Amino acid sequence: MQPDRAPEDVPAAPVAEILVVRAREGDLRAFEELYRAHHRRIYALALRMTGDACRAEEVTQEAFVKAWESLPGFRGESSFGTWLHGLTVHVALRYARTERRREARIEAAGDLSAYAAEARRALPETSIALERAVAALPDGARRVLVLHDIEGYRHEEIARQLGIAVGTVKAQLHRARKLVMEALER
C-alpha cells in the first residue's frame, strides 16, 4: 500500500486536518480518533517490517507515542497518514538497530530456524503463503524487500535509511526475492 492511499476508515482529508489541528492543540480525544483511523495500517506496516507480531505491536505503540510527541512539529506538508507512515518506518528501523545491538551483547538462545518452522505450522492453512515466506526471511533481506517491493522506496532511500551501500540493498533484495520464490515453490 502506498503511503498516500488511505483505507476506508481513515477520515476524509478535511476531517483529518481538523483532527490534526485539535490534536496539536493537546486534544487527546482527537488524537485517539487519529489512532483508531490509522492503527491497522501502521500495525500492518510494522508487522511487515519486523516479521513478528509482538515486535510489530511495540513498533506500532512507539510510532504513535512518537507521533503524539512530534505532532507540534508536523507542518502539514503531506497528509497525516503519509507523515505517520514515514515516522513508523523510522521507528521500525531504529527498533531493528537496537535489537541488533542487544543481540550482539547477549548470546542467542536457541536456533531461530526452529522458531520459523513453528511459526509456519501455527499459521492456518488459509494464510497467505507470501506473507509466510516474507516473515521467514532473514531480517536484513526482509526489511529491504518490504521497503522496496511493498512500500515502494527506491534503492538509494533504503540504503540511506538502513545505513548500508546501494549495492548491498540490491544484493539483499535479490536474495530476498530468490528466497521467497523458493519458499513459494515448496
Image (cartoon, rainbow, N blue to C red):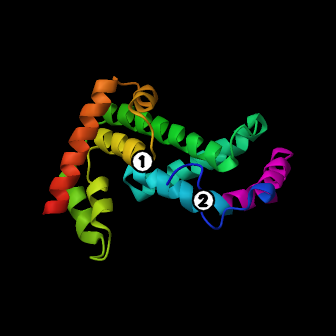
Residues 159 and 49: in front is 159
Q: Position of residue 4 (x, y in %)?
A: 60, 49
Q: Is residue 17 magenta?
A: yes
Percent position (x, y) of residue 129? 27, 65
Of pointers 1 and 2, the one earlier in the residue sequence: 2
The secondary element bearing badge 1 is classed as helix
Image point 84% across, 48% down: which residue? 21
Q: Is residue 103 above or below residue 135?
A: above
Left or right of 159 in this view: 186: left
Q: Which residue is mark 1?
A: 49
Which quadrant would residue 136 be assigned to in this image? bottom left
* Residue ID at (74%, 38%): 74
Label 1 crowd (10 A; few <14 / some 14-19 / many >=20): many
List the residue tagged with mark 2: 39
Magenta part mainly helix, strand or loop?
Answer: helix
Which numbered marker is on residue 81?
none
Amino acid type of the residue that numbered disc 2 sits on in the rendered structure: His
Residue 115 sits above or below residue 25 on the image? below
Label 1, label 2: how many angstroms apart (C-alpha)? 15 Å
The amino acid type found where label 1 is placed reads Met
Q: Which residues are magenta?
A: 16-35
Element under label 2? helix
Residue 107 visible, this angle: no
Q: Confirm whether the magenta stretch covers residue 119.
A: no
Q: Is residue 132 left or right of residue 69?
A: left
